[in-house]
Amino acid sequence: MGRRIVFVADDPDLHNLLSYTLEAEGYEVLGARTGSAALELCQGANPDLVLFDLAPSGLAVPEIRLVRTDARLRDTPIILLTDDTDEESRLQCFEVGASDVVAKPFSVRELLARIRARLPGGPVPGAASTIREEAFELDPARRQLSVEGQIVSLTRSEFRLLEGLMRQSGRVLSRSELCAAIGGTKPASEQAVDIHVRRLRRKLAPHGDRGRCIRAVRGFGYVFRPPSKLDPPS
């Protein structure tokens, strides 16, 4: 199991999106929706890092102060996500005990880089494990996809999208979650997700029904289903 992160957000979409992303990177994520629940988790789980979403309601500020009074957690890195972008608000975040502050909207890849910078000591265990789904074999370490033993050339964004879907095989992922999976120097758009899916399907089409493994769920997103679990073509 990878390093342990307590993630606190009262926005369910943000909570699901980042929890999924962090787990896909190999972290153990303990989630909380309220400040009081977060404080209990921090005191009982001894996390390696705490990630707080600072909501307009002020969620996190009292709890961060309390975390910093606990001798066991005094040096635990705390990263704060905030809608406030002015200098004074960001300085106040540091004053209450934040180790780092990330303004929303943010690049997921940048957030992951900031987390890694706060957790030195090498790669996260399990983050680059090979994913196998019947004829599919995805190797994150080499950024390589093979289908029935044949290499399929993918762009970086296509690879990260497929990796996100295969790690959650059978689960429908929203376009927002897939934007996070793609990452990049700028957050991907939901329209970009649809474009990458179309290109992926075209590249998988020469391998029989493999292109049908990425199924659209109208009004929500996409799901990966291995060939044996596909419905017969209509």
Image (cartoon, rainbow, N blue to C red):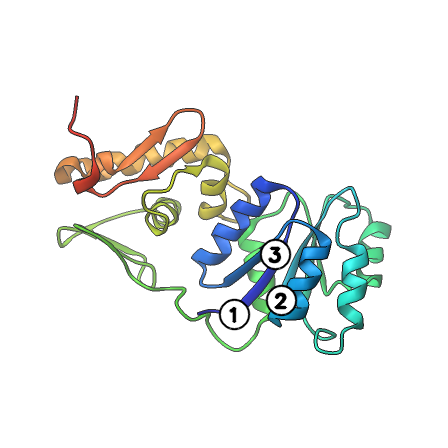
90 in relation to 14, above or below: below
Q: Type of residue at label 2? A: Leu
In the image, what residue occupies the spot 52% across and 45% down? 17
Q: Earlier in the sequence, mark 2 or mark 1?
A: 1
Instruction: Report helix, strand or loop for mark 1.
Output: loop
Q: Circle 1 sits on which residue?
A: 3
Distance, label 3 to label 1, CA atoms, is 13 Å
The residue lying toward the viewer, choosing from 233 and 100, is: 233
222 in relation to 58, above or below: above
Q: Position of residue 50 (x, y in %)?
A: 65, 63
Label 3 with label 2: CB-CB less than 8 Å: no
Q: Is residue 202 left or right of residue 166?
A: left
Would residue 54 be visible to someone looking at this image?
Answer: yes
The residue lying toward the viewer, choosing from 145 and 30, is: 30
Q: Is residue 105 left or right of residue 208?
A: right
Q: Circle 2 sits on which residue?
A: 49
Q: Earlier in the sequence, mark 3 or mark 2?
A: 3
Q: Type of residue at label 3? A: Phe
Q: Circle 3 sits on which residue?
A: 7
Instruction: Report helix, strand or loop for mark 2.
Output: strand
